[in-house]
Amino acid sequence: MVSLIEIKAYLGIPTTDTGSDVILNIFIRAAIDAIETYCGRRFERREYKMDRHSGDNTSRLMLHQWPVISVERIAMGTVGALNIDGTSSGGYSATVEVTRDEGDPRESTQLRLIINGGANDGTNTVSFATYTTLTTLAAQVTTFAGWSSSAVSGYGAYKSTELIPVGALDAGQISLALDTPDDWLTGFTVDFKTGEVGDATFPCGFQNIYVDYTAGYSKIPRDLELTVMQIVADINSGRTVNRALRSEKIGDYSYTIAAGREADASIVAKYSKDLDKYKR
């Protein structure tokens, strides 16, 4: 949202003075994190894949991020696309997990296949970056002792990253089918400014709506950039002050530390009037 060069100019630090660069970058990230936590959104333009929403049987769906630049897909269901079986004998469990990207918990990145006990005890991983389709993914899984896999007919060409991230599922007692989003919505309207999607019925369910879209500002609003710089300046000027300190007692000294959202709120509290217009 703001660069190190901009922050140094705001603070009156010469660009040639690099002694505080590391800590200033930390302050910038802290300020942005606090603002985004307070506002409940991200501001910079980025793509969102399989952003999950819970339908409520109404014709209105509010995307988590806005302003919206484009909506690539809205899917309102799932379909089994990859069959996996744990065929090992002698083991007591065989599980499969579709793991997530640490940077974006909605983006699937690999399979983890775990057999406990028996001759094939151990863990195998299969990267979606290497095995990019369900056909190639299934072929690789089948090379592991104690496992067999096949793409469901019609889904072999699907990208591996289409698999929905899930925790460990049993593949030893029953044949497991891993899901991809399905039932794509073909008619809907989007309020690009607010992130509201309408003109469709979104069925009731828990995180049963999957949306691929791009949202955020290509150019961050100037007042928001200024607020980031002001917060960085506040943090920088009070390095020895614990801004997450909620209460303090002098006699028989004691203190309480605010945590999580409360700590973030303490950083941005004086700028709440400037930031409230960016909240829902």
Image (cartoon, rainbow, N blue to C red):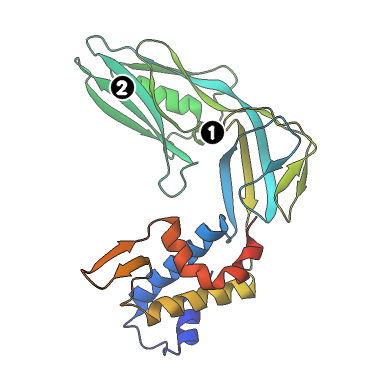
Tag of residue 144: 2
**Mark sitting earlier along the chain (1/2):** 2
SS for dot 2:
loop
Q: Tell me if 196 is positioned left or right of 130 in this view.
A: right
Tag of residue 162: 1
Q: Going 45% across and 83% down the picture, which residue do you hit?
A: 8
Circle 2 crowding by C-alpha within 10 Å: few under 14, some 14–19, many from 20: some
The answer to whether any part of residue 253 appears in the image is yes
Between 26 and 253, the one lying in front of the other is: 253
Between 204 and 160, the one lying in front of the other is: 204
The answer to whether any part of residue 2 appears in the image is no
Q: Going 34% across and 83% down the picture, which residue do you hit?
A: 18
> Quarter of the image containing the C terminus?
bottom right
Q: Quadrant of residue 92?
A: top left
- Determine whether 24 is above or below 279 in the image: below
Locate residue 129, reporting x and y percent: 43, 40
Q: Quadrant of residue 277?
A: bottom right
Locate residue 111, reporting x and y percent: 39, 31
Locate residue 49, reporting x and y percent: 56, 43
Between 153 and 206, the one lying in front of the other is: 206
